[in-house]
Image (cartoon, grey):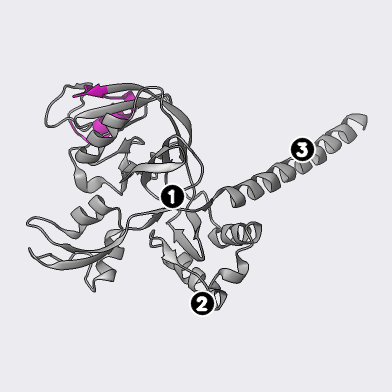
Amino acid sequence: MKSLRHSVLLTVLLFFVWLALNDTFAGERATHWLSNALVGREFVHSVQKGESLAVLGARFGVEISVLAANNGLRPNALLKEGQTLRIDNRHIVPNSLSDGILINIPQRMLFHMRQGHVIQSYAVGLGRPDWPTPAGKFTVITKEENPTWDVPKSIQEEMRREGKIVQQRVPPCPENPLGKHWMGLSIRGYGIHGTIAPTSIYQFRTHGCIRLHPDDIADLFAEVSTGTPGLLFYQRLMVARLEDRIFLEVHRDVYRKEPNPFGNLLAIAKTNNLEPMLDWEAAKAIIAKQEGVARDVTKTAALR
């Protein structure tokens, strides 16, 4: 009987500890994720030969469906050379790291930070839902140009299941999936690298690594040194305040980790006294659409 009472008391104690930790975390996150910066812009693009919605979405960090809808097109529409497209690729910069590499998984954006300012920002490709990119702190521990790909056992097994030729090592060559640059992370087995499939950028199609356009990884590689810290995290709803304007950005919950984005918005708004400034109907519409673009949700009356 005494043992049972102790067990019950321990369960109750653990429950209240769990509640306290979750309340603390929720409060910290609500405060933490109020940003004060955006990257990207609204602009008009003239289609070049060979470009498609998939190519442009990957290059500019916009969902193909959103890019199509904004221009009155179908997602599979063929583009003509010289055709003009309206592009909005504004993204909220998470306010969670002053120096280093910051990657928000649902957002599929990489931010290279220095003294609290963005010096580089790129769209990235990340792990597919059945092979997710892990969250956590990391350090860049290696840098290689023209890397050799030592194929992990797990990927070799996948090749075998799919009836492909099983490769153990892929030397530097035009067929190497890592492209021409590799930055190995302290999270074992994962890295930031280039690609030979540029349209896979801004998609969830990798085996967990962070994939950049060849031009972007070359620029980042030149700026980043070994020992650079970084953070991979999962935040599908973000809010930014730029003076008297409020912006909201919402992404799909591809890894099914944040089922209640409206609850997150309420917490952020309450913690940062934003309720009177928000157009709640516009915010609800943005949450429903999950377009992945920073939208202005400032309540007009709040500006008077």
| Residue 166 coordinates in the image, percent (x, y) | 21, 26
Query: Between disc 1 and disc 2, whose residue precedes?
Result: 1
Amino acid tagged 1: Val
Q: Are marks 3 and 1 in contact (CB under 8 Å)?
A: no
* Figure quadrant of residue 302: bottom right
* Residues rendered magenta in the picture: 144-164
Residue highlighted by disc 3: 14
Closer to the eye: label 3 or 1 = 1
Residue annotated with mark 1? 93
Query: Which of these two is toward me, 218 or 67?
Result: 218
* Residue 5 belongs to magenta span: no
**Mark 2 closeness class: few <14, some 14–19, many ≥20 residues within 10 Å:** few
**Residue type (three-letter) at the residue carrying disc 3:** Leu
Q: Is residue 42 left or right of residue 304?
A: left
Distance from the alpha carbon under mark 1 to that under mark 2: 24 Å
- Disc 2 marks a residue whose amino acid type is Thr
Which picture quadrant has residue 86? Answer: bottom left
Count of numbered circles in the view? 3
For disc 2, the marked residue is 300
Vertical arrangement, residue 143 with respect to residue 75, above or below: above
Q: Earlier in the sequence, mark 3 or mark 2?
A: 3
Q: Which mark is residue 36?
A: none
